[in-house]
Amino acid sequence: MQSPAFLDGRLCALLALRDVSAEAWLDEVCQSLGVEQPRDPASAERLLGWRRQTLEALSASDLDYMPLLPDELFSLGEQAQGLKEWTLGFIEVVDEVADNELRERWSQALREALSDLEGLGRIDTDIDDSPENENDLFALTEHARMAAMLLYTEQHPGMPQVEQTDAPVH
């Protein structure tokens, strides 16, 4: 069974690269959990809400997507493990879906960001709770977040509309 962070990484990449449908997302999560279907309609709706919320955040003009990771109630080591798992899920989908032809169309910035994420999937998660490690983890999380949004925006030109200008009124 995969962690929520791993599944969220997969979800983010699937939305960016395949526009994963609600039905396909339910199948993905159920397969990961080793069940045929959600146990009840409320569980299914929660899983679909997760997909909907992630899609809305990725496509919003305010660029406020945040990976689903352990928060400050967890140790830095647990937070780092969550980031590592999110990254592994994200990269797994990129590796499964993105062929060389697609990758060649990506910007240099995106290719570099994804290369950095591959390294992030190998980070040491046995870290002490210290202000320096907390700052480093924040920076790494921000880098992963930006890479995810960059992948989404390059695969969905015009979404989000982050550079809209008001048209002059005549």
Image (cartoon, rainbow, N blue to C red):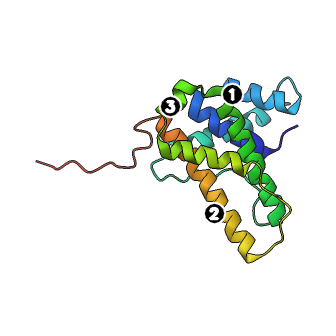
Q: Nearer the viewer, mark 3 or mark 2?
A: 3
Which corner quadrant holds the N terminus?
top right
Q: Identify the mark nearer the N-term, 3 or 1.
A: 1
Q: Tag 1: residue type?
A: Glu
Q: Residue furthest left?
A: 170
Answer whether labels 3 and 1 touch (C-beta < 8 Å).
no
Residue in the picture at 56% in, 46% down? 112
State the separation of the CA atoms marked 2 and 1. Answer: 27 Å
Give residue 17's quadrant in the image.
Answer: top right
Seen from the viewer's position, the closer of residues 154 and 66 is 154
Q: Looking at the picture, how far across and down is residue 80, in whole percent?
A: 78, 58
- The answer, for residue 20, to whether it is visible in the render is no
State the separation of the CA atoms marked 3 and 2. Answer: 27 Å
Residue in the picture at 58% in, 39% down? 55
Give residue 4's quadrant in the image.
Answer: top right
Seen from the viewer's position, the closer of residues 130 and 41 is 130
Residue that carries the numbered disc 3 in the rendered image = 104
Answer whether labels 3 and 2 touch (C-beta < 8 Å).
no
Which numbered marker is on residue 139?
Answer: 2
